[in-house]
Image (spheres, rainbow, N blue to C red):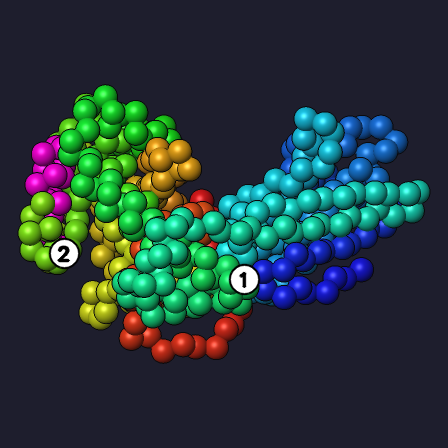
Amino acid sequence: MSSDVAAPGAERCGIDSVEIARIERLLRETPADGLGAFFSAQELADAGDGPGRAASLAARFAAKEACLKLFPRGAALGQVEATDFSVARDAYGAPRLVCNAAAQYQLDLHRIARVELSLTHDRVSASAVALAVPARTAPSRAGRFIRRFLPLRGKIVTANLQRVYGAYVEPDEIERLAAAHYGHLWRLLGEFIRFRWLSAARKKALVRVEGIDNFIAARDQGKGILILTGHFGNWEVSTTAGIAQFPEMRGKFHFVRRPIKPDWLDRLVTRRFEAAGFGVFSKRDSLDAMLESLAQGDAVVLPFDQHAGPPDGIAVDFLGHPAWTFKSLAIIALSTGAPVLPGSSWREADGRHVLRFEAPLAPIEHDSTTEAIRLNTRAYNAALEQLVVRHPEQWYWVHRRWKHVEPRPKRRTARVEPQ
């Protein structure tokens, strides 16, 4: 069965049915260790070994296909597959959708708050219905006011959001995201002013660090660490207060950054980073300092979400559109063997911040150095995409990320596996 594609932002429904005999044949002909290509370990365990095993797995397979139908564009482009979804049980035994990174990216990109599943089967077939419930951003009063009366780079913000979300969400949600972004910038300004006056204990309580095991594992390789990040959340508060919780890392973190305007603000930000024990490298003359820091086993933090025209950058996809992107990170990673560790931050509803380190990205090898640089740079952008859409209102939409690149027709491309 197939489902109609709903308009952007509307509730959408995917429906699918599977003959139980098809799954019975799969179970007979596939070795036990090969079933993982179709079902998760939890799905296989939940199905048990009794006579209802095939029917249970058929219902789960139908649910995967129903979920895939919620994202026809992503499926057509090879960005998501049925096996990126799995079905677990909640505390009451009801079906609950579990997504891997590729599937979660599609939910976030389409601004889907949750997917409700309904499974059923008879003696012949199993059916599933997947209902996608759209998210609705709730901007603050300050954000709505600024968006209406003082919209800094308002046309750029609108164009960027429309470029990324226009095919997936309703115009009203794009407008709410824009207002929420201005609300985020307003809070960021207030936090920037107040931060220096907070006690050490208050700063520590303000930030929760996640994924520290990923950081330690990367550090233990002894090649230094390249931290792939962008302008997420309040990057100053989360980074300085978060890393300060690990005194042994003082002097071991170095930030590569462009000078910002006005000059007094650039000097203030630099002084704050240096006072917190971080090195600061200018993006213009940082290569030797970066290589020396990596050789010492230090971490180098590179904001990777800014426009970089030629010859410093290459055009690779970012959030579905070609964008000039720095190639230096790929060059350094491939030449030094230093692990690339995605990192991000965001503000939670209670005002606390989270600093999170993801698992290191696997390097992509290729006989052609040029192609290796391109493939790895695209993989870095793919990692950042997942971080952007996780908390979109807290990314830096005022930046002209896609300037000077001509749009090109959509084509099916090789899928970059999320890490």
- Front residue (pair 348, 335): 348
**Residue 367 x %, y %:** 35, 60
Vertical order, 248 against 413 (above or below)? above
Name the side, left or right, on which 275 lies relative to 321. left
Residue at the (69%, 32%) spot, across then down: 89
Q: Which mark is residue 169?
A: 1
At label 1, the amino acid type is: Val
User: How many residues crowd around disc 1 within 10 Å: few (fewer than 14), some, or many (20 or more)?
Assistant: many
User: How many residues crowd around disc 2 within 10 Å: few (fewer than 14), some, or many (20 or more)?
Assistant: few
Look at the numbered discs 2 and 1 and tell me whether their residues touch, using CB distance below 8 Å.
Answer: no
At label 2, the amino acid type is: Ile
- Front residue (pair 41, 282): 282
Magenta region:
269-283
Q: Quadrant of the C terminus?
A: top left
Vertical order, 392 against 405 (above or below)? above
Residue at the (67%, 37%) spot, across then down: 96
Name the side, left or right, on which 112 lies relative to 123. left
Residue at the (27%, 45%) spot, across then down: 188
**Residue 410 x %, y %:** 50, 73
**Residue 138 x %, y %:** 47, 49
Q: CA distance from mark 2 to mark 1?
A: 33 Å
**Residue 226 x %, y %:** 25, 43
Q: Secondary structure at mark 1?
A: loop
Q: Secondary structure at mark 2?
A: loop
Vertical order, 115 against 351 (above or below)? below
Name the side, left or right, on which 39 lies relative to 408. right
- Front residue (pair 29, 355): 355
